[in-house]
Amino acid sequence: MTVTVDILQRLPLLSALPRVTLSELSKVSDFKTFNKREVVVNKGAEPQHLLFLLDGRLQGVDFTVDGKEVGVFFTQPGEFFGELGVMDHGPHPETIIAIVKSTVITIPRHAIRPLLLAMPALAEMLTMRLASKLRQASTQRRILGLTSPTQKVCAQLWVMLLQDPVSAASEKATSNAQRSMPPQGPAHVNRIVQMPTQQEIAIMVNASRETVTRVFQQLLLKGLVQRDGVDLLILKPLLLRDISEGQAFLES
């Protein structure tokens, strides 16, 4: 299957490029499909491409000194990754794993790097992406510092809800003051699309899968969340947020 100009134009980072430039990129671009739990990028590997997630979901992980896997971030469709190595020629800083079957577009470093450096709009988007990753890392450190497993899981779900493409698309019309709260009301369902498994959540919050399972059972029993196929519906987002911030507690 060919990476067409129309496909590249759907990627936010590349959407403003002239079609003639996209046509040149399409000639050197490629698709790669990864099955669930397959490694997309190995930590320490030499970066050869800027990568874009076309569909699916990825999880960036690192490892403690004793070899324990710790989650760092999730990558959503349309987002790019591997940008650090493209810019500084250093090795990949994390391992990235497909948590569902995923399709990735690869563009060689030698083809994309000159555009990132020469075009102010691309450079700004690259800077914003790096800033977003720094903020995500800061948020993840805060979650890891929480002592209550329930608070950790709720905080992780809250972050994922705000970052999910469904919520993000709905938030574009809201004011800056409202963007810390996803849309409410019967016309909108707060949904985490392709919800990661409990094991993958456990990796993110540095807890055992059994602990995360117990927390999810409580959230289901109290009506805060509900399964909808592979998605997770957040039925009481305000309460979820308050629990994540330590301002409310689940009654036993």
Image (cartoon, grey):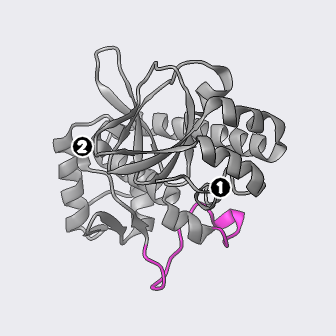
Q: Earlier in the sequence, mark 2 or mark 1?
A: 1
Residue at image position (76%, 38%) is: 115
Percent position of residue 124, x then y:
77, 43
Residue at image position (46%, 20%) is: 45
Residue type at mark 1 is Pro
In the image, taking residue 173 as reference, residue 230 lies left or right, namely left
Cβ atoms under marks 2 and 1 closer than 8 Å? no
Quadrant for the C terminus in the image: bottom left
In the image, taking residue 34 as reference, residue 179 lies left or right, namely right
Which residues lie in the magenta part? 172-189
* Mark nearer the viewer, 2 or 1: 1
Callout 1 environment at 10 Å: few (<14), some (14 to 19), or many (20+)? some
Percent position of residue 154, x then y:
36, 53
Quadrant location of residue 18?
bottom right
Residue type at mark 2 is Gln
Q: SS class of the residue under badge 2?
A: helix
The residue at which mark 1 appears reads as: 12
Dominant SS type (magenta):
loop
Percent position of residue 192, x then y:
40, 62
Quadrant location of residue 40?
top left
In the image, taking residue 181 as reference, residue 252 lies left or right, namely left
Residue at image position (48%, 85%) is: 187
Residue 129 showing in the rendered view: yes
Q: Which mark is residue 209?
A: none
Inspect the magenta stretch and tell me whether residue 77 lies in it: no
Callout 2 environment at 10 Å: few (<14), some (14 to 19), or many (20+)? some
The residue at which mark 2 appears reads as: 199
Q: Nearer the viewer, residue 26 or 51?
A: 26
Q: SS class of the residue under badge 1?
A: loop
Q: Nearer the viewer, residue 200 or 182?
A: 200
Above or below, 20 against 208 in this view is below
